[in-house]
Amino acid sequence: MSPVSATDYCDIVQVEDTRVSPNGTRVAFVRKVPSGDDSYEQTIYTVSTDGESDPRRLTIAEGVDSHPRWSPSGDRLAFVSTRGADDDRPQLWVLPVDGGEAEQVTDVPGGVSGVEWSPDGSRLLFQQATTEAEREDGLDVGLDGEEYERETPDPRVVDRLVYRQHQRYRDDTVTHAYLAHLDGDGADGESEVERLTDGDLDHVAPAWRDDDTVYFGVKYPQGETEPDDSVVIDIQSLDLDSGDVTDVTRTTCWGLVMDVATDGRVAYAKTPEERLSMRSSDIEVYDPETDETTVPTANLDRTVDLAGGFTWGPDEEFVYFLTPDEGHYVSRRVPGDASEDPELLVGDGHATTLSVGGDADAPVVAYAKSEWDHRGDVFAFADGEETRLTEVNADYLAEVDVQEPEELWFDSDGVRVQGWVLTPPEFDEDETYPLAVEIHGGPHAMWSESGTMWHEYQLLAARGYVVFWSNPRGSTGYGEEFATAIESDWGDVTMTDVMNGVELVCERDYVDEENAFVTGGSFGGFMTGWIVGHTDFFAGGVAQRGVYDLSSFYGSTDAFKLIEGDFGTTPWDEPEFLWEQSPVAYADEVTTPTLVMHADDDFRVPVNNGEMFYLFLKKNGVETRLVRYPREGHELSRSGEPAHVVDRLERTVRWFDGYSDHHDVPTALERGDDGLSAAESADEDADDEGRDE
């Protein structure tokens, strides 16, 4: 068996966006694997829910495919793809499932997302972001094969509060709902695509009620508060025949997630407006016939996982959803009328992207799930039993030495905190090992023994480290009181929990507490910076994409509401308080060698925070280095260019190794590019060129 390496990332297959067919017999999913230094092969597969056949590839490896959506009859699959394009604008395609070529449905300038079939299967609903000029010129409904490229504003004039997100500037674009007519009979008798909404406000999360009615969400100004500064979302309905728009209900949430039943009942996310960033999200159900609202998750002290979405089941009686729960992401269902408490369906593993199909009396739930011994596969749950449908990394896992984490619970300030310990391959309890401590982002998130961190945990163990990670107070999955325990105090409360866990692990004879290291990304980067400014316990630290100055973060992020919610203030109201809560305020106390890594196009935690922390450390004589990744955003560690993902892992381990007494290597500052795959690849290319000459 081989040890896990950083470059293994390029061999690990990921599964995403599982969608079960209407009759419950097949699951469509996205298969994603690195295909080069800067790209992924991302294609759509299907697999039978009986678990008795191998997955079948549906789409060719051209472009990036995503968003598979079954037609109501199950004979066609809509998906979004960049195939055939000379840019990265995804378009809508439809493919006959049992044979035939995929046909392109749209050619629009804003790209396609949020795809939903009409109940009769004749139309597809989607959303895209377009400019006023594109809408006025009719370009938003079709470019007719003409070459078109948006001009980059010069200068860029900004009027919106949130003017950039997800590695892109909005540049005066507004999101609207669109309809693609598959029979070519648009509203004007010619166009195959028509816009359903208009104006200078975003219309998001479009969903069908029936063949004649569409729901969507709109953020309107709230008095003098502009939409980008509000969490209030109005859910409205549009009658496609008359064009009439009707108010349905109103909610407050970070971003709208909803699903509509055919009788008009709408299930939607609701998060309390006060201190919203820390609060648990519930599912509310509004019935326009009775004008009544129920909260079926009210008795469940767990936040609903909005990233995983939720959906009505085939009988439209139950709503199916995911929640974080004590180190697992579990699936549940609950009656929409709140007549019963939520029912646990699958209570272990780390599940994502839940969908439901099948008959009303025999529903089939499909999801992707990772566990300690694999990065993720497609699963189905039916008749009270779970079936694993794929083993996408079977060949890889047969060759590498994967370790099983040990779960532990410990007391911290009278609160029980959950963590895990992972030991190296060929572990010998009579030997001693350095310790690597990982801290999650969020801060209101939850780690498990698997998920997106699976490879990194196993890599650190393979390099000879005992690995410890935990879910300190502030994490989700343990109730709202636990999540709000860091109100106005990210640093001290979280550090108390992390260090109490570290102290417990260091009581083990095989852990060398003189050789302990710490790292984390986003909020984990904040905590790495906070910890090295408050203790010299760690021999080295790696701070990644972190928030280091709360005020400058507030002034440059798209998530400034996080500061308002978690700290209850703004930089102009309490500048000194926010300074005292920022890691940079303690840069003159840092003695721990600290590597700072950031992404150039990170608009969630802009790179100025990394620059500031690095400069402060450098000015105070700390051994440090700043590594910046071009073309990358905040999701660098999860979905960045493969070469960058590998480089980040290698640099983290190199930094630790250089200050570890258990690794006989120079510090990273003295090693140059030794041990970095990118440098080795460049040398090989140079050698090849030399031989060619």
Image (cartoon, rainbow, N blue to C red):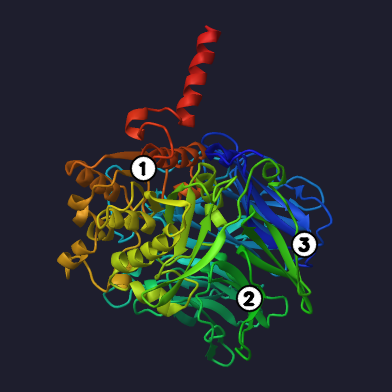
Q: Earlier in the sequence, mark 1 or mark 2?
A: 1
Q: Residues within 10 Å of mark 1 (few under 14, many from 20)?
A: few
Give the label on residue 332, or none: 2
Residue at the image point whose x is 59% and y is 40% from the top: 3
Residue 7 appears at what percent x and percent y? Answer: 55, 37
Q: Quadrant of residue 593?
A: top left
Q: Quadrant of the N terminus?
A: top right
Kindly identify the amino acid type of the residue bearing the numbered disc 2: Arg
Residue plotted at (68% across, 83% down) = 317
Q: Residue furthest right?
A: 52
The residue beneath circle 3 is 74
Q: Nearer the viewer, mark 1 or mark 2?
A: 2
Q: Earlier in the sequence, mark 1 or mark 3?
A: 3
| Residue type of the residue flagged with mark 3 | Gly
Name the foreground residue: 99 vs 318.
318
| 42 left or right of 445 in image | right
For badge 1, the amino acid type reads: Thr
Earlier sequence position, callout 2 versus callout 3: 3
Evaluate if marks 2 and 3 touch, with contact meaning CB atoms under 8 Å apart.
no
Front residue of 423/690: it is: 423
Q: Secondary structure at mark 2?
A: strand
**Distance in Å between CA atoms under marks 1 and 3:** 42 Å
Which residue is rendered at x = 58% and y = 67% of the image?
A: 329
x, y (%) of residue 241?
60, 74
Residue 341 is drawn in which quadrant?
bottom right
Name the front one of labels 2 and 3. 2
Q: Which residue is mark 1?
A: 152
| Dot 1 and dot 3 residues touching (CB under 8 Å) | no
Q: CA distance from mark 1 to mark 2?
A: 46 Å
Report the side of 670 relative to 254 (left or right). left
